[in-house]
Image: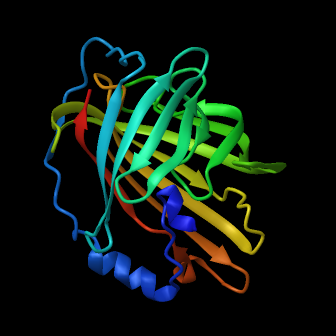
């Protein structure tokens, strides 16, 4: 069942393009203002067993509360293992970083991915204007027989002071984009995904993350006909 992975896919067609425009703003506005970059490069909090982040996950199309997601660090070493559990959906696939800040197993999209070479989770320099491109391949979690191309661009844009239900944070706003990656679905001709992320070094995690994807199927002539994946927003509501 697709939505067990917390990346519920909307199998709508051209109507979804209209819905995207009409429904953005259905979720509540999260206050944020641009601030000057810190004079000293911030240090990202190191991982420790028991660290935890709780997120409210909403569908940006209609404002629906999808789930309350709890992520907990359960193992620290060469690999950092983070378990994930939804209040509605129960146990979800784990996230694995190796080392901290480099993603090996990413469960946030459907299907969950395991990379053959790790890629950064956040900008390697926490300053506006930094960008990087990373080329790797991924396997579908639990299906090691095939691997697929993945190219990721990370662009750091600005420092923001952002207020969530968990409090106020100074966060680096950056965008991660995977354009024209290879899908495990052979009927997809082209696929794009984008994450807008507000990353707070003091908690070692994002305080807001917005994810959106689209793809073309056989017979489609252009992106105006693309099928939209669900547009989801994670907002931090508690952490420790």
Q: In this view, does 109 lie to the left or right of 70?
A: right
Q: The N terminus lies in which quarter of the figure?
A: bottom right
Say if 73 sits above or below 162 in the image.
Answer: above
- Name which residue lies at 60% across and 21% down: 79
Q: Does residue 199 appear in this view?
A: no
Q: The C terminus lies in which quarter of the figure?
A: top left
| Picture coordinates of residue 78, whole percent (x, y) | 61, 16
Say if 92 sits above or below 27 in the image.
Answer: above
Say if 43 sits above or below 228 in the image.
Answer: above
As rendered, which of 24 and 68 lies closer to the eye? 68
Q: Quadrant of residue 216?
A: bottom right
| Picture coordinates of residue 130, whole percent (x, y) | 45, 30
Residue at the top extreme, as displayed: 40
As rendered, which of 208 and 131 lies closer to the eye? 208
| Picture coordinates of residue 25, whole percent (x, y) | 22, 68
- Name which residue lies at 44% across and 50% down: 195
Say if 211 sits above or below 8 in the image.
Answer: above
| Picture coordinates of residue 22, whole percent (x, y) | 28, 80
């Amino acid at each position: 069942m697709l939505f067990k992975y917390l990346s519920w896919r909307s199998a709508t067609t051209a109507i979804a393009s209209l819905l995207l425009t009409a429904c953005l703003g259905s979720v509540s506005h999260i206050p944020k203002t641009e601030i000057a970059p810190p004079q000293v490069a911030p240090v990202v909090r190191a991982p420790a067993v028991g660290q935890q982040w709780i997120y409210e996950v909403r569908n940006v199309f209609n404002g629906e509360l999808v789930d309350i997601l709890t992520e907990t660090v359960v193992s620290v070493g060469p690999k950092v293992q983070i378990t994930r559990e939804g209040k509605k959906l129960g146990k979800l696939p784990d996230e694995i970083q190796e080392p901290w800040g480099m993603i090996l197993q990413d469960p946030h999209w459907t299907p969950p991915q395991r990379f053959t070479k790790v890629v950064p989770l956040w900008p390697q320099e926490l300053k506006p204007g930094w960008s990087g491109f990373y080329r790797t391949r991924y396997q579908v979690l639990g299906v090691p027989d095939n691997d697929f191309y993945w190219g990721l661009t990370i662009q750091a844009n600005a420092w923001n002071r952002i207020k969530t239900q968990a409090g106020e944070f100074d966060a680096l706003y950056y965008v991660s984009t995977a354009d024209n990656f290879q899908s495990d679905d052979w009927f997809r001709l082209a696929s794009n995904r984008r994450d807008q992320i507000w990353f707070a070094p003091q908690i070692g995690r994002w305080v807001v993350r917005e994810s959106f994807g689209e793809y073309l199927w056989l017979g489609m002539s252009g992106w105006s006909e693309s099928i939209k994946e669900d547009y989801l927003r994670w907002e931090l509501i508690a952490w420790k």
